[in-house]
Image (cartoon, rainbow, N blue to C red):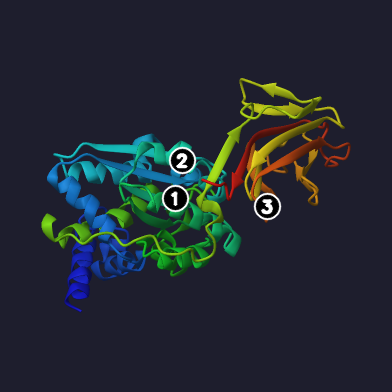
Amino acid sequence: MRSMQRRNSALAVGLAFLLVATPIAPGGDPAIENEIFARSLVSAGDTVRVQKVLAAARRGDPVTVAVIGGSITQGALASKPENRYGERIARWWREKFPRSKVGFANAGIGATGSDYGAQRARRDLLRHHPDVVVVEYGVNDANTRACAETLEGLVRQILREPQAPAILLLFMMTDQGGNAQEWQSKVGRHYGLPMISYRDALWPEIQAGRMERKEIFPDTVHPNDRGHELAARFVTGFLEGVAAALPPNGSLPAPKPLPSPLFTDLFENTRIHDAGDLPPLRNDGWTLDAKEKCWRADRPGSMLELEVEGRLVFVQSLRLHAAMGRARIQVDDRPAVTLEGWFDQTWGGWRRTDIAARDLPPGKHRVRIELLEEKHPESAGHEFKVYELGAAGVER
């Protein structure tokens, strides 16, 4: 009970610290400000890993801060890189612990979810050996069990790293207050992760008329500089609270072992293959574009066959408002799936990740990619691009 009271008191210190910054509520009403910051903390979780990193920074040891997510994390609509929430969080670490060399890695990629995040974790995130990671997929993931499963795979990959990194889940929102927090928080609670909700903090202010959407949203999803600032302040407010109650180095508890999966460990062991990594078993009409790093074809009937190992196979392809076609993907003798290359929006192309087959037996599987004659009625062509094949359930 005393430890819980001490932690709550420390978190209150962190919130009070943030009230010194630019106020959120009209007139900077302290009562409303406190409510906003209190709402931002969904759960403090088990702070042992966070304490470990804070203690290392306090000693002057080097620390690496990392963020992974979609376009919000990548920094879409922030006016400059230093205004992105991730860079702001890293700046807090540097200012709080000037004797510590703080590295920073931004692994955000626009228009991607935790399914792709789980596949590319080793390549884009874990190679930096992060000590603390903010995971932001609350907007790009659907609020479903399927997305919670891929998020769990990403979380398990990070937690099992030898340096015992700390993870914080950050739940952003759309301009209508939507996100995947319901299902993602199930993962967070199972693993005792601190969870910060931009949505819980600010959506009630918008609903009550104390804040207008345009103050933080230039479009329907991405925050402006003000939004990035607030997201970072909610995270660093929590960190301030934990730091205020940080015990002496000799009294730090050990991190708990990784628990059994909540949903599945399928996405804990993944592998990603860029175009060109896998020699084709068959190639009739497809060209390897070395510059764009993709397989491309525009003649219906073109066939490409590749081989991957795993119990689930992903395909990443391009969707674009252009002369794009459709492709049929079949893994072994499983039912085929058809992927659409045409996109009805004009804001740009995006790489979509789709599951081609799951519940496969362990081992290698043949993936056949066939360009179809049929296409979207509004498309003027058949071009299709495949960038990567991914696999989950790969044997270590």
Decide: is 380 above or below 287.
below
Q: Earlier in the sequence, mark 3 or mark 2?
A: 2
Evaluate whether residue 319 shows in this view: no
Is residue 63 shown left or right of residue 282? left
Decide: is 131 above or below 201.
above
- Image mark for residue 351: none
Name the residue that disc number 1 marks. 157
Task: Name the residue rendered at 46%, 40% in the picture.
Answer: 122
Q: Secondary structure at mark 3?
A: loop
Say if mark 1 contacts mark 2, CB within 8 Å.
yes
Q: Secondary structure at mark 1?
A: helix
Q: Nearer the viewer, residue 345 or 371?
A: 371
Q: Residues within 10 Å of mark 1 (few under 14, many from 20)?
A: some
Name the residue that disc number 2 marks. 122
Q: Residues within 10 Å of mark 3 (few under 14, many from 20)?
A: few
Q: Earlier in the sequence, mark 1 or mark 3?
A: 1
Task: Name the residue rendered at 57%, 58% in the picture.
Answer: 147
Is residue 73 shown left or right of residue 257? right
Residue type, label 3: Pro
Name the residue that disc number 3 marks. 361
Tell me where residue 315 sits by quadrant.
Answer: top right
- Between disc 1 and disc 3, the foreground one is 3
